[in-house]
Image (cartoon, rainbow, N blue to C red):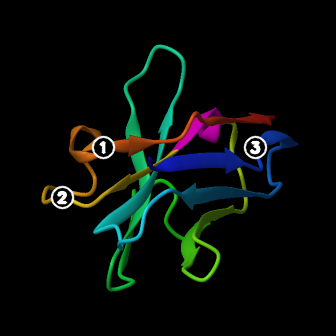
């Protein structure tokens, strides 16, 4: 049974940094794509960044240059380094993984989700 467990969220002042981690377990294959999504109160779930099996990465425009997604295959862990945080980055952040076809930026294509970790950025 695949499990994704996020950690590293918290409260910071604007301009600060956080690093999210997502520990994956319960599988013996490589996911086709792993991603970080976020959801703010009253808003839909949106992709923040994703990384595909060949190591290619993609970011939503509002975080490009500030956030970095990476993975450590030896540790089965996905990371999201978040720098220069802004109040608009405040949301619940979710780790997700899939091994099926489909666009990596669309949450409906992901079959595995973590429980989420809260990020709050104050001005």
Indicate which disc residue 14 carries: none
- The residue at 35%/81% (across/down) is 56
Q: Which residue is mark 2?
A: 100
Front residue (pair 122, 78) = 78
Q: Which residue is mark 3?
A: 9
Q: Which residue is mark 1?
A: 111
Q: Is residue 85 magenta?
A: no
Q: Position of residue 9 (x, y in %)?
A: 76, 43
- The residue at 44%/60% (across/down) is 49
From the viewer's perspective, tell me whether residue 62 is left or right of residue 57: right
> Could you tell me if residue 61 is visible in this image?
no
Specify the segment rendered in magenta.
88-94
Q: Secondary structure at mark 1?
A: loop
Q: Is residue 90 magenta?
A: yes
Q: Position of residue 68 (x, y in %)?
A: 58, 70
- The residue at 41%/70% (across/down) is 28
From the viewer's perspective, tell me whether residue 73 is left or right of residue 23: left
Circle 1/circle 2 CB separation < 8 Å: yes
Q: Secondary structure at mark 3?
A: loop
In front: label 2 or label 3: 2
Q: In which quadrant of the rendered view does residue 17 lie?
A: bottom right
- The residue at 85%/42% (across/down) is 12
Q: Position of residue 75 (x, y in %)?
A: 65, 75
């Amino acid at each position: 049974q695949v499990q994704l467990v996020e950690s590293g969220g918290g409260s910071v002042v604007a301009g600060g940094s956080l690093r999210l981690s997502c520990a994956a377990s319960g599988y013996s294959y490589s996911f086709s794509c792993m991603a970080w999504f976020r959801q703010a109160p009253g808003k839909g779930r949106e992709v923040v960044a994703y990384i595909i099996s060949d190591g290619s990465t993609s970011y939503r425009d509002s975080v490009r240059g500030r956030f970095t997604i990476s993975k450590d295959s030896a540790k089965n862990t996905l990371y999201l380094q978040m720098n220069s945080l802004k109040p608009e980055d405040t949301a619940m952040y979710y780790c997700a993984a899939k091994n099926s076809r489909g666009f990596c930026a669309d949450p409906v294509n992901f079959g595995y989700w973590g429980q989420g970790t809260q990020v709050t950025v104050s001005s």
